[in-house]
């Protein structure tokens, strides 16, 4: 049994979207249904180019401190200013206020009894107030545990008091990568990656029944015409993890590219690492010869949730 752990994610930040038009404003921009966001439910969504290519991904929840009158966006910290700028381009006359929520910290809470400690069921996106902020089950996969948005100056104390031991980013990445779940621009190429090759559909990041949003036409066409030719999948790596961006080859021919990776040392045995790799689908159907990332052999491991 894995003990409950928590990690303040320094590479994630928070934006706040308030105002009377906040729901309709976001509904025309993001890939998921904003109407699903309530005090009890958070969602995962993406902001795309008009051509349907990835720009940003984020978790969307209601701000418990604003009585349901504002949304919180858990996004990439280093790219939060870019997301804010792009959102403002579409504000026009909408009654919305967009600003960083610099007083909040994002945490990942995981381990076998993490959800039990929070009093949350293993249902994607289920949310509740917690520690002066909120906690919600990861909308992508409950197996990843929960996320919490907490007052920055109190977050560490809140997590400790709730019984969560400190974790490292490597601990969390090992769980996330083995599950095949991407983490922003670490795994998705800006203005190039598409949602369906990155697993957004199966990971509850796309709503097919909502109205139009930026990039919706290409995303829908890709689905209905079966145009997905590559998939982001976890790969087991024999030996130390190569650098992200390393080409993956088979018999000297390009087969894909490695994204984020994490190393794990198996005690006295050989070192095994894990990574996320964008691979051509025909490569996944043929295991006659090994895949290589530099000098390391990589073996794809299809996640249980994936439908390709």
Image (spheres, helix red, strand yellow):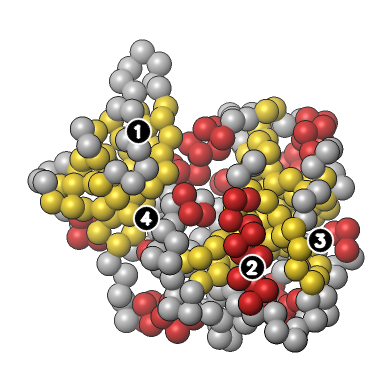
Residue 63 bears which disc, if any? 3
Marks 3/4: CA–CA distance? 32 Å
Residue 85 bears which disc, if any? 2
Is disc 1 surrounded by few (<14), some (14 to 19) or many (20+) residues within 10 Å? many
Along the polypeptide, which appears first: circle 4 or circle 1? 4
Identify the residue at horizontal 16%, vertical 41% (top origin).
290
Marks 3/1: CA–CA distance? 39 Å
Which residue position is annotated with label 1?
241
Identify the residue at horizontal 64%, vertical 59% (top origin).
81
Along the polypeptide, which appears first: circle 2 or circle 3? 3
Judge whether residue 156 can be spotted in this image.
yes
Farthest top residue in view: 268
| Mark 3 vs 1: CB contact within 8 A | no
Marks 4/2: CA–CA distance? 28 Å
What SS does tag 4 mark?
Answer: strand
What SS does tag 1 mark?
Answer: loop
Q: Nearer the viewer, residue 23 or 93?
A: 93
Along the polypeptide, which appears first: circle 3 or circle 1? 3
Which residue position is annotated with label 4?
232
Q: Nearer the viewer, mark 4 or mark 2?
A: 2
């Amino acid at each position: 049994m894995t003990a409950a752990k928590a990690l303040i994610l320094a590479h994630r930040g928070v934006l706040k979207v308030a105002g009377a038009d906040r729901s309709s404003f976001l509904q025309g921009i993001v890939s998921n249904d904003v109407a699903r966001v309530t005090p009890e439910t958070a969602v995962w969504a993406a902001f795309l180019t008009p051509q349907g290519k990835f720009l940003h991904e984020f978790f969307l929840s209601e701000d418990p401190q604003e009585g349901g009158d504002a949304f919180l966006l858990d996004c990439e910290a280093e790219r939060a200013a870019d997301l804010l700028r792009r959102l403002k381009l579409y504000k026009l006359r909408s009654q919305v206020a967009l600003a960083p929520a610099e007083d909040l910290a994002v945490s990942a809470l995981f381990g076998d009894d993490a959800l039990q400690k929070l009093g949350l069921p293993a249902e994607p996106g289920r949310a509740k107030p917690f520690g002066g902020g909120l906690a919600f089950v990861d909308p992508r996969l409950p197996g990843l545990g929960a996320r919490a948005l907490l007052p920055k100056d109190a977050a560490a104390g809140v997590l400790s008091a709730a019984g969560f031991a400190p974790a490292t980013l490597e601990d969390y990445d090992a769980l996330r990568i083995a599950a095949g779940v991407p983490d922003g621009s670490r795994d998705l190429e800006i203005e190039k990656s598409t949602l369906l090759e990155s697993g957004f559909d199966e990971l509850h990041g796309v709503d097919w029944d909502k109205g139009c949003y930026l990039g919706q036409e290409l995303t829908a066409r890709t689905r209905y015409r079966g145009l997905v030719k590559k998939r982001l999948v976890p790969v087991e790596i024999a030996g130390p993890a190569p650098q992200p961006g390393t080409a993956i080859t088979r018999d000297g021919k390009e087969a894909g590219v490695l994204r984020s990776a994490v190393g794990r040392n198996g005690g006295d045995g050989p070192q095994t690492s894990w990574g996320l790799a964008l691979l051509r689908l025909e490569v996944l159907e043929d295991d006659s010869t090994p895949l290589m990332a530099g000098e390391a052999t990589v073996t794809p491991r299809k996640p249980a949730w994936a439908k390709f």
